[in-house]
């Protein structure tokens, strides 16, 4: 060993070992200083792990088995011979086979009513521009846009959820949960159990009735969910943009004329003649034009209904003051038929019966506001008519004029005009017109011939409307609304509403309350009958291999 003198005069005994020069570690701050002897066991202590994740001394090592309460371990009470009913039965979980022969509405509705753990994986996925997989945000955005058009068009909440679920699964997103309320749509996608969910939402701010657009959206969803048809995201966006840009199939003057024909046909149903038909039609068209004027000024729909209800009532009161030999009650009743919100009422009751209580409450509240607007508009005119000694006779409700052929023709004309107002496709107008005529024939046979109560007769006729509408929608893989909504037009409680308002205007509160209660009962009978007819059709025409639709099961309210 050689000695070297450092600048401080300290002798350095470090030198090359075995002919090799000294390394930098010999002068490291962590090296043992010269002349210091290590303590016994210090090397072993320094070599031990000092991580904060290490188990301290004296603490027993954790067991490698899953602790009780883990999602991957069986509970203490579990045994293979006597498995609790909460776990998979020994026979296994039934395999759900959703055949493509069934409409996509039934297939998606079946899966939505399943438990999440029992839903089958997507059987196919639409092709993408690249093969890496779907762009999750774009798929969710497309799904929300489709759901917005359906909800704004008056579709039920359950069918909107089914459509959204169908779009997501068709593009490979199998862990999706859509949520629909009256004005808000949201959807959440869970990529896996360890990844953050992706959630998107959209607000429905404007509603419009256009069943042609609604049918086009249904065809788009059908093509997307069809495994034999390849619809890329870009193609789906292009078709959706075309649907939104398409104009309404009927111009404004046709809608106004259809409003007049609807009111005139309704007046014939309750015993009117040609003069009554013309008077009711003129009043309804005048009210429609005033409502369009208010809408152009940005007035809310509540005030539009008030304004639209005034002209028919004013014409009826004017004919009474002129001592014309006409049924003024038929004129006012015909004008009310064109305003009653039957579409929103049926959708609201349907949402309530299928478990969407928030959406149902919002829809029914909207119906109540519209109905109150009609009441205010008619009551204002009737009040001034009573003050002017207009001989408005509430006993006219008891005068039933039976003209079967005229009434059947009027009911079909009413349904036809209603279909035009709903902007239906021309290919569906004939079917819904026949459906409305059949509904009135059933109602007349049960009420006028059979002597049954109007509520029961209305419920049965509405049930047949819902049944036939659901069968037609299954045949054409489309929405049931175009085949149902217009067909219930002849069954709407226009006369009961008018005589209830007349009772209030003349100070006969008891009689008015009885008539309005009857009108509410008829409206509920229509809505429940339509929904029951649809459910009966689904009950007997099950999804092949799916074992029927599942619904929430409750006992005694809890």
Image (cartoon, helix red, strand yellow):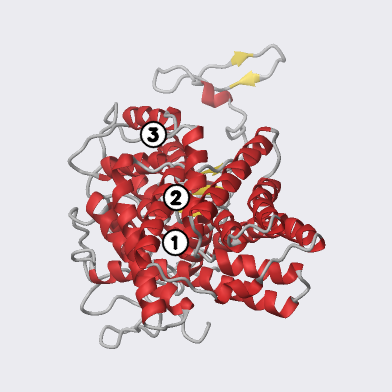
* Residue shown at the point (34%, 35%) measured from the top left: 134
Q: State the residue in front, 191 or 344.
A: 344
Q: Position of residue 279 (x, y in %)?
A: 57, 50
Number of other residues with Cα within 10 Å of mark 2, as a class: few under 14, some 14 to 19, many 20 or more: many
The answer to whether 230 appears left or right of 310 in the picture is left
Q: Is residue 341 above or below residue 125?
A: below
Position in image of residue 523 (x %, y %): 52, 68
Q: Quadrant of residue 90?
A: bottom left
Residue identifier under label 2: 418
Label 2 vs label 3, nearer the camera: 2
Residue 389 numbered mark, or none = none
How far is mark 1 from mark 2, CA to CA?
10 Å
- Residues 112 and 378: in front is 378
Residue 137: in sight, yes or no?
Answer: yes
Image point (40%, 82%), residue name: 76
Q: Secondary structure at mark 3?
A: loop
Q: Give yes or no for contact between labels 1 and 3 (Cβ–Cβ under 8 Å).
A: no
First along the sequence among labels 1 and 3:
3
Sequence-first disc among 2 and 3: 3
Crowding at label 3, few (<14), some or many (≥20) Cα neighbours within 10 Å?
some
**Tag 3 residue:** 135
The numbered dot on residue 490 is 1
């Amino acid at each position: 060993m050689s000695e070297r003198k450092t600048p401080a005069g300290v002798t350095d005994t470090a030198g090359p070992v075995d002919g090799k020069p000294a390394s930098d570690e010999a002068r490291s701050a962590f090296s043992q200083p010269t002349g210091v002897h290590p303590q016994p066991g210090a090397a072993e202590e320094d070599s031990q792990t000092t991580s904060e994740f290490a188990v301290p001394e004296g603490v027993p090592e954790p067991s490698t088995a899953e602790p009780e309460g883990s999602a991957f371990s069986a509970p203490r009470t579990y045994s293979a011979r006597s498995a609790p009913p909460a776990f998979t039965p020994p026979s296994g979980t039934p395999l759900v086979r959703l055949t493509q022969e069934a409409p996509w509405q039934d297939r998606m509705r079946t899966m939505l009513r399943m438990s999440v753990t029992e839903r089958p994986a997507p059987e196919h996925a639409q092709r993408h521009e690249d093969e890496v997989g779907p762009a999750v945000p774009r798929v969710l955005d497309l799904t929300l846009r489709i759901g917005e058009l359906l909800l704004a068009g008056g579709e039920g909440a359950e069918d909107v959820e089914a459509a959204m679920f169908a779009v997501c699964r068709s593009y490979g997103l199998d862990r999706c949960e859509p949520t629909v309320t009256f004005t808000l749509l949201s959807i959440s996608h869970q990529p896996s159990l360890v990844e953050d969910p992706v959630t998107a939402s959209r607000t429905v701010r404007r509603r419009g009735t256009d069943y042609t657009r609604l049918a086009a959206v249904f065809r788009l969803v059908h093509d997307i969910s069809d495994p034999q048809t390849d619809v890329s995201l870009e193609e789906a966006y292009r078709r959706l943009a075309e649907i939104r840009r398409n104009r309404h199939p009927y111009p404004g003057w046709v809608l106004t004329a259809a409003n007049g024909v609807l009111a005139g046909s309704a007046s014939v149903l309750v015993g009117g003649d040609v003069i009554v038909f013309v008077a009711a039609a003129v009043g309804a068209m005048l009210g429609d034009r005033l409502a369009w004027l208010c809408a152009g000024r940005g007035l809310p729909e509540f005030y539009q209904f008030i304004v639209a209800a005034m002209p028919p009532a004013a014409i009826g009161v004017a004919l009474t003051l002129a001592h014309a030999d006409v049924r003024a009650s038929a004129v006012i009743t015909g004008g009310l038929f064109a305003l009653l919100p039957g579409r929103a009422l049926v959708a609201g009751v349907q949402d309530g019966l299928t478990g969407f209580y928030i959406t149902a409450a919002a829809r029914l509240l909207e119906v109540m506001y519209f109905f109150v607007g009609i009441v205010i508009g008619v009551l204002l005119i009737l009040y001034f008519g009573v003050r002017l000694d207009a001989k408005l006779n509430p006993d006219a409700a008891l005068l039933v004029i039976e003209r079967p052929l005229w009434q059947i023709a009027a009911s079909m004309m009413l349904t036809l005009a209603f279909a035009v107002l709903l902007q239906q496709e021309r290919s569906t107008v004939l079917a819904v017109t026949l459906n409305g005529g059949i509904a009135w024939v059933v109602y007349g046979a049960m009420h006028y011939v059979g002597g049954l109560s109007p509520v029961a007769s209305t419920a049965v006729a509405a049930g047949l409307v819902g049944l036939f509408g659901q069968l037609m929608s299954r045949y054409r893989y489309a929405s049931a609304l175009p085949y149902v909504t217009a067909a219930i037009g002849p069954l709407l409680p226009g006369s009961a509403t008018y005589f209830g308002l007349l009772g209030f205007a003349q100070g006969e509160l008891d009689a008015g309350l009885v008539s309005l209660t009857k009108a509410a009962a008829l409206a509920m009978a229509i809505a429940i009958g339509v929904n029951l007819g649809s459910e009966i059709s689904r009950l007997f025409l099950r999804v092949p291999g799916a074992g029927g639709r599942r619904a929430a099961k409750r006992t005694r309210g809890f």
